[in-house]
Amino acid sequence: MMLCPCCSGKRLNQCCGPLLAGQHYARTVKQLMRSRYSAFALGNHGDYLLETWHPSTRPDVSAEELGQLDTQWIGLDVVDSSQQGDKGTVTFCAQWQDEEGQRQTHREHSRFERITGRWYYVDGDIG
Ligand SMILES: [Zn+2]
C-alpha cells in the first residue's frame, strides 16, 4: 500500500487520493493544501491543480504542463493554518531535492478562498 506523499502517515487512498480522484472536495484549507502538494509530488495531476486554483489567479498553462514532474518533492510540513468564513491560510514547508541531491526547502504562506462550498488556492508569499 502506497503511503500518501503529503507525509500524513496515512495511505494515499485514505488521504489525498479520493480528492485527486474527484470523489469529494477538500473540507478544510489544510486538506486542500496537502492534496495540492500530493498532486505536485505525484505528477500527472495537472487537471486537479487547475481546478483547485482560484479563477482570478489560475495560470495560463495546460494540465499536461502542470502535471510534469520537474521538481522532486520529498516532504511536507504544515506549520500553521487558519480559516475564517470563506477565507483561509496555510503556512507550510515543502522539501525538495535538487540535481546535486541537496535537500532544499520551499516555505510558503498560502491564501485560499471558498466559492460555493469549494476551496481554491489563491496565491502565496514565498519565504
Ligand atoms: Zn495526503
Image (cartoon, rainbow, N blue to C red):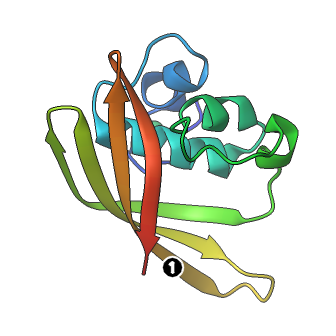
Position of 41 relative to 99 (above/below): above
Residue 69 pos. (x, y %) = 80, 55
Report the residue at 61% width, 72% height from top: 96
Residue 90 pos. (x, y %) = 30, 55
Quarter of the figure that contains the N terminus: top right
Report the residue at 71% width, 29% height from top: 47
- The reply, left or right, for residue 9 in relation to residue 12 is left
Is residue 92 visible in the rendered image? The answer is yes
Report the residue at 63% width, 38% height from top: 49
Report the residue at 36% width, 44% height from top: 112
Quarter of the figure that contains the C terminus: bottom left
Q: Residue furthest top?
A: 23
Dot 1: element: strand
Q: Which residue is mark 1?
A: 105
Q: Nearer the viewer, residue 18 or 62?
A: 62
Position of 74 relative to 19 (above/below): below
Residue 115 pos. (x, y %) = 36, 24
Count of labels in the image: 1
Q: Nearer the viewer, residue 112 or 21?
A: 112
Is residue 5 visible in the rendered image? The answer is no
Position of 56 relative to 125 (above/below): above
- The reply, left or right, for residue 4 in relation to residue 71 is left
Characterize the local packing of mark 1: few (<14), some (14-19) or many (20 or more) Cα atoms within 10 angstroms. some
Q: Is mark 1 within 8 Å of ligand 1?
A: no
Quadrant in the picture for residue 102:
bottom right
Find ligand 1 in the image and state its quadrant.
top left
Residue 11 pos. (x, y %) = 47, 32
- The reply, left or right, for residue 31 in relation to residue 68 is left
Residue type of the residue flagged with mark 1: Thr
- The reply, left or right, for residue 92 in relation to residue 84 is right
